Image (cartoon, rainbow, N blue to C red):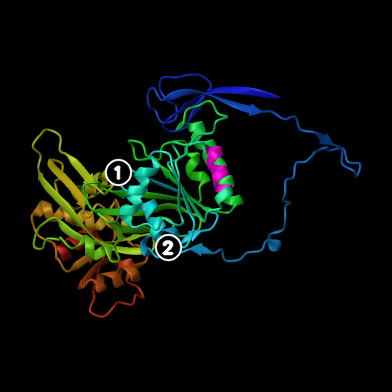
């Protein structure tokens, strides 16, 4: 028996409600609830009585093509991967593109998502690629492909938004890689909601997921983001895919960061660094040297931190500017760092070390357009703010890493050996570390450790 189910769904977060409301109960956004009618088929289950005479009936045909099996009977073998030869991309993917994987690539408009996906045609010239374009015409994609030097023989263009037509084309072509640009433009004709709605995005992704696993084919979905920076559509979209990649950067700068937020076949939070040029994206093999290339020496408010992004150590400059407040309320601005974490560190500096920042404007910037979230960046931020507040330059030959507690203590960080090796590789002479990390630690030749327990000790050692 078929019936139609009507509900109201938030276009931003996917929260549904039985009736229309002005403000979404899930994300508190206004006027985002849209009525959607989803046709569903209700099938009455058939109950059978067990042959052994038991009284408990079971569902007829409940099993599909598989049966429950013991864990010891499950065969495990290493899955093959498609290596693109683009080292930064392969690193983020966990060593290459996994066969039968579904990957979501999201980023701001104009950041280079379509360029990155088209680039795969140059690095996978020996494999068949199906590029489904729902936003651009075939002529527009061809112009970009020619500019990037794509081999046209194994690169197929399909300007289509109907999911059923996309599935039929993929079944007919049997490509190695399929790219859908973008998931917000495709639709299922059996649904009454508009393309890009919560229901369409969810159901279209489910259909593409089933195709990806059955062929198998490596599928990439290009996704839009909202004003808040989250992926447009239902939150379940990120749970359905195997890998979620964010393409970050400033459109007015040349450098881009590809970050893995979820990866079932590799390390999460791994990053790859690229430079956008006229001929496309070029990988950056040594991003630490890139981020420190324009570093100024002998200037207050500058400290170098060694942060871990996935399995990669990165040396990045942390810049701070502390000036007397021009207005009644001091400003707190952070670029590339959590603003709430900055407020916490300012409170620790004022309470534990006597730096009166309550009447000062504080501006913080992570140079190079990188966003750092790990706790090991705390100490560098605190030292940069203190350096600018006192107008005393920090030691330019010292790299810093450490977490700052509310009591002013310096807590241990992870993967210290990799941080030390990266600092030594780029010619730094000293590393300021929590004392708890120095036990049984092998120090590279030419590198001196400065162990500290308290924030005051770190200020005395560097400033």
**Residue 286: percent from left, percent from top:** 28, 66
Q: Nearer the viewer, residue 70 or 459?
A: 70
Residue at which label 2 appears: 84
Q: Is residue 418 magenta?
A: no
Label 2 secondary element: loop
Q: Measuring 35% from the left and 73% from the top, which residue is drawn there? A: 439
| In the rendered image, the vertical position of residue 372 relative to residue 139, given as above or below | below
Viewed as shown, does residue 281 lie left or right of 78?
left
Q: Which residues are magenta?
A: 163-171
Distance (Cα) linking label 1 and label 2? 23 Å
Q: Measuring 37% from the left and 23% from the top, which residue is drawn there? A: 30
Q: Nearer the viewer, residue 201 or 293?
A: 201
Q: Quadrant of residue 93?
A: bottom left
Viewed as shown, does residue 430 lie left or right of 323?
right
Residue at the right extreme, as displayed = 53
Q: Residues within 10 Å of mark 2 (few under 14, many from 20)?
A: some
**Residue 406: percent from left, percent from top:** 29, 50
Viewed as shown, does residue 268 lie left or right of 382?
right
Residue at which label 1 appears: 110
Q: Taken as a whole, is the magenta stretch helix, strand or loop? A: helix
Q: Nearer the viewer, residue 459 or 43?
A: 43
The quarter of the picture where the N terminus appears is top right
Q: Is residue 414 visible?
A: no
């Amino acid at each position: 028996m078929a019936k139609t189910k009507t509900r109201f769904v938030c276009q931003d977060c996917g929260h549904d409600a039985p009736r229309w409301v002005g403000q979404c109960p899930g994300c508190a956004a206004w006027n985002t609830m849209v009525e959607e009618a989803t046709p569903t088929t209700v099938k009455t289950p058939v109950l059978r009585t067990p042959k052994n005479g038991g009284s408990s009936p079971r569902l007829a045909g409940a099993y599909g093509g598989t049966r429950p099996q013991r864990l010891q009977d499950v065969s495990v073998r290493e899955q093959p991967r498609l290596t693109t030869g683009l080292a930064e991309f392969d690193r983020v993917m966990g060593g290459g593109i996994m066969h039968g994987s579904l990957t979501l690539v999201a980023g701001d408009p104009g950041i280079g998502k379509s360029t990155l996906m088209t680039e795969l045609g140059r690095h996978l010239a020996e494999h068949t690629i199906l590029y489904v374009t729902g936003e651009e015409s075939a002529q527009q994609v061809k112009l970009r492909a020619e500019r990037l030097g794509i081999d046209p023989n194994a690169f197929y263009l399909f300007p289509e938004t109907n999911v059923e037509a996309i599935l039929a084309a993929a079944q007919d072509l049997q490509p190695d890689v399929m790219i859908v640009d973008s998931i917000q433009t495709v639709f299922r004709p059996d649904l009454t909601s508009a393309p890009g709605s919560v229901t369409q995005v969810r159901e279209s992704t489910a259909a593409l997921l089933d195709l990806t696993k059955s062929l198998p084919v490596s599928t990439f979905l290009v996704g839009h983001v909202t004003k808040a920076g989250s992926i447009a559509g239902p939150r379940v979209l990120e749970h359905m895919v195997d890998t979620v990649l964010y393409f970050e950067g400033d459109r007015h700068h040349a450098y881009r960061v590809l970050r893995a937020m979820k990866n079932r076949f590799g390390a999460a939070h791994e990053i790859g660094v690229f430079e956008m040029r006229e001929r496309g994206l070029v990988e950056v093999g040594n991003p630490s040297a890139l981020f420190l290339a324009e570093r100024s020496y002998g200037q207050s408010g500058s400290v170098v931190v060694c942060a871990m992004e996935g399995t990669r150590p990165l040396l990045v400059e942390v810049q701070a500017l502390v000036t007397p407040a021009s207005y009644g309320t001091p400003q707190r601005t952070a670029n590339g760092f959590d603003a709430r974490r900055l407020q916490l560190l300012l409170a620790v500096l004022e309470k534990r070390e006597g730096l009166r920042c309550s009447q000062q404007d504080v501006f913080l910037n992570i140079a190079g357009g990188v966003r750092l979230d790990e706790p090991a960046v705390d100490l560098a931020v605190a030292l940069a703010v203190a350096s600018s507040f006192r107008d005393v330059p920090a030691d330019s030959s010292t790299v810093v890493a450490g977490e700052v507690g509310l009591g002013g203590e310096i807590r241990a960080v992870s993967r210290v050996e990799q941080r030390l090796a990266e600092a030594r590789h780029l010619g730094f002479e000293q590393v300021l570390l929590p004392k708890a990390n120095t036990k049984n630690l092998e120090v590279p030749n030419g590198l001196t450790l400065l162990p500290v327990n308290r924030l005051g000790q770190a200020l005395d050692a560097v400033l």
